[in-house]
């Protein structure tokens, strides 16, 4: 049983390695260097792998002690939680912390798509759309969203990033 | 620079784990706490996009 456990732990580590390498390689290939939060998530994944690696390091002649398994899995769980926090944190940063230029990058924005996606996603504000895209102000069936709200802040950059 | 230090700490923790050194867990904990502090710092610092 200990051998199967050690095999599973080793496989876990070996699955982490191509995930990290492929993510980094894909980003470089697409010309998108990893953002700071990407780096934090990857460091957390590596820390999780370190916790798992501790178990085979501590195994002597395929004998795994309970303390070695508990400490190693505990390290992996703590690091995985840290990496898991990174995902909502990145959403928070994208939705709340980034403010976009209004007019300077207008040519990169498909205005009709932007307005449609804003209304569909209930994120952003119509006044910002009007300033950026020009033309008539689009009326949302959900009322005026000028200034945004805590859950749907104004100036959502996701559409810009997707449709620029 | 921060990321280089994180990676260095990670490598040190890996070597300590491999050698069974007593500094293994402290290095791991320092890295985790520092990364968490860095994450909180990222979340509370205004960002600006540059196209």
Image (cartoon, coloured by chain):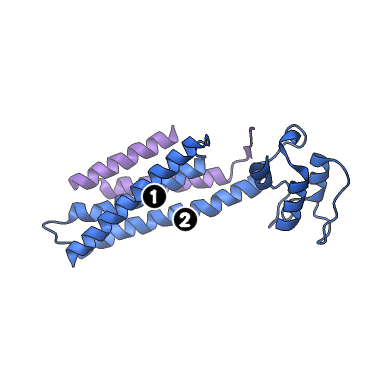
Chain colours: A blue, B purple
Residue shown at the point (21%, 65%) measured from the top left: A66
**Where residue B14 sits in the image (x, y, percent)?**
27, 44
Q: In the image, what residue occupies the spot 36% across and 38% down?
A: B7
Kindly identify which numbered label has been placed on residue A84. Answer: 2
Q: Secondary structure at mark 2?
A: helix
Q: Chain of mark 2?
A: A
Element assignment for label 1:
helix
Relative to A160, residue A75 above or below: below
* Residue A95 image point, x, y percent: 64, 49
State the separation of the CA atoms marked 2 and 1.
9 Å
Q: Of A87 and B23, which appears nearest the observer?
A: A87
Q: Residues within 10 Å of mark 1 (few under 14, many from 20)?
A: many
The residue depicted at 24 percent of the width and 42 percent of the height is B15
- Give the vertical position of A70 relative to A125 (above or below): below
Judged from this view, the residue extending furthest toward the bottom is A1
Asked if residue A107 can be seen in this view, the reply is yes
The disc, 2 or 1, on the residue closer to the chain's N-terminal end is 1
State the quadrant of the C terminus of chain A. top right
Task: Work out whether residue B13 or residue A3 is closer to the camera in this orientation and state it.
Answer: A3
Q: Are marks 2 and 1 in contact (CB under 8 Å)?
A: no
Question: Which chain letter goes with mark 1?
Answer: A
Tell me the quarter of the image containing the N terminus of chain A.
bottom left
Q: Which residue is mark 1?
A: A45
State left or right for residue A10 relative to residue B30.
Answer: left
Left/right placement of residue B43 relative to residue A16 reads right
In the shown orientation, is residue A70 left or right of residue A93? left
Q: Are marks 2 and 1 on the same chain?
A: yes
Q: Can residue A65 be seen in this snapshot?
A: no
Seen as rendered, the residue at the extreme left is A61
Mark 2, residues whose alpha carbon is within 10 Å: few (<14), some, or many (≥20)? some
Residue at 70% x, 55% y is A152
């Amino acid at each position: 049983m200990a051998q199967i456990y050690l095999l599973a732990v080793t496989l876990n580590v070996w699955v982490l390695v191509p995930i990290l390498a492929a993510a980094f390689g894909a980003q470089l290939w697409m010309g998108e260097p990893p953002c700071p939060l990407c780096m934090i998530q990857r460091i957390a994944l590596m820390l999780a792998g370190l916790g798992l690696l501790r178990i085979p390091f501590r195994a002597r002649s395929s004998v795994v002690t309970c303390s070695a398994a508990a400490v190693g899995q505990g390290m992996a769980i703590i690091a995985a939680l840290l990496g898991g926090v990174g995902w909502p944190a990145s959403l928070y940063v994208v939705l709340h912390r980034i403010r976009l230029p209004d007019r300077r990058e207008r040519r990169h924005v498909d205005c009709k798509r932007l307005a449609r996606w804003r209304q569909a996603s209930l994120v952003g504000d119509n006044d910002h759309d009007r300033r950026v895209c020009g033309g008539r102000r689009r009326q949302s069936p959900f009322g005026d969203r000028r200034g945004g709200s805590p859950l749907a802040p104004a100036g959502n950059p996701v559409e810009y990033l997707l449709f620029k | 620079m921060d990321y280089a230090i994180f990676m260095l700490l990670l490598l040190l923790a890996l070597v300590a784990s491999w050698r069974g050194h007593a500094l293994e867990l402290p290095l791991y904990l320092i890295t985790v706490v520092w990364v968490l502090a860095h994450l909180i710092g990222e979340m509370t610092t205004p960002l600006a996009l540059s196209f």
